Image (cartoon, helix red, strand yellow):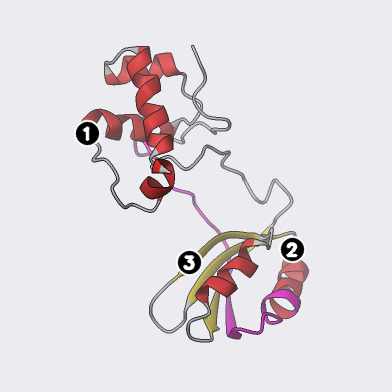
Amino acid sequence: MASEQMADGAGARPLDSIDRDILQMLRTDGRASIRSVAERVHVSRANAYARINRLIDDGVIRGFGARVDHERAGQGASAYITLKIVQNTWRTVRDQLRRMPEAAHIALVSGDFDVLILVHTRDNRALRELVLTKLQAIPEVLSTRTLLVFEEETLEVGAVGTVGTVGDAGPADG
């Protein structure tokens, strides 16, 4: 299927300045209406709608979601956890990590460790439980190192000093 081929980057269509402007706008406000997108990038609503759908079909836009304040959502402990894993087991480890609701970001990286995970848990006790009983129980994980996050700042797209609007279901009609 074309969207599967586009999603992995193979054969992806090049983006023009209007596509890039649409992406910038949707990164700032994922709830922007088709009308406001069209007006902002100076195209018709039909053109804006078609472009957004093409960006979705091509896998450039992978989805729309809310930016969550983890502390207010009851996930007061955050940490980056590094893993050293058995060589050539990345896909197996990744599949197990994907099933962990605490994992917010998973990356295969270079350097002194192999995998970097960002996790959010209720508190430090839950974080300890995650590391000791879930992560270290994965047979392919050789070692872990936990880096507690004391304070974090999510960088929003847009002008310096402004915070983007929380997005949810994607562009609204209008």
Q: Which residues are magenta?
A: 133-162
Q: Is residue 158 magenta?
A: yes
Secondary structure mainly formed by the magenta segment: loop
Question: Quick one: SS at disc 2?
Answer: loop
Please tell me which residue lies in front, 124 or 113: 113
> Disc 2 vs disc 1: Cβ atoms closer than 8 Å?
no
- Residue at 54% of width from left, 83% of height from top? 85
For label 1, the crowd category at 10 Å Cα-Cα, with few meaning under 14, some 14 to 19 and many 20 or more, is few
Choose mark 3 or mark 1, whichever is in front.
1
Residue appearing at x 73%, y 80% in the figure: 132
Which quadrant is home to the N terminus?
A: top left
Please tell me whether residue 28 is drawn above or below residue 93 in the rendered image. above
Q: Which residue is mark 2?
A: 123
In the displayed structure image, the side of residue 2 where residue 12 appears, left or right = left
Q: Nearer the viewer, mark 2 or mark 1?
A: 1
Toward the viewer: 75 or 1?
1
Where's residue 79, x and y in %? 60, 67
Amino acid type assigned to the residue bearing label 2 in the image: Asp
Q: Amino acid at mark 1?
A: Asp
Number of other residues with Cα within 10 Å of mark 2, as a class: few under 14, some 14 to 19, many 20 or more: some
Instruction: Tell me the element at label 1.
Output: loop
> Which residue in the protein does label 3 denote?
107
In the displayed structure image, the side of residue 123 where residue 114 appears, left or right: left
Find residue 16 and name its label.
1
Asked if residue 156 shows in the view, the reply is no
Considering depth in this image, is 167 or 99 the residue closer to the camera?
99
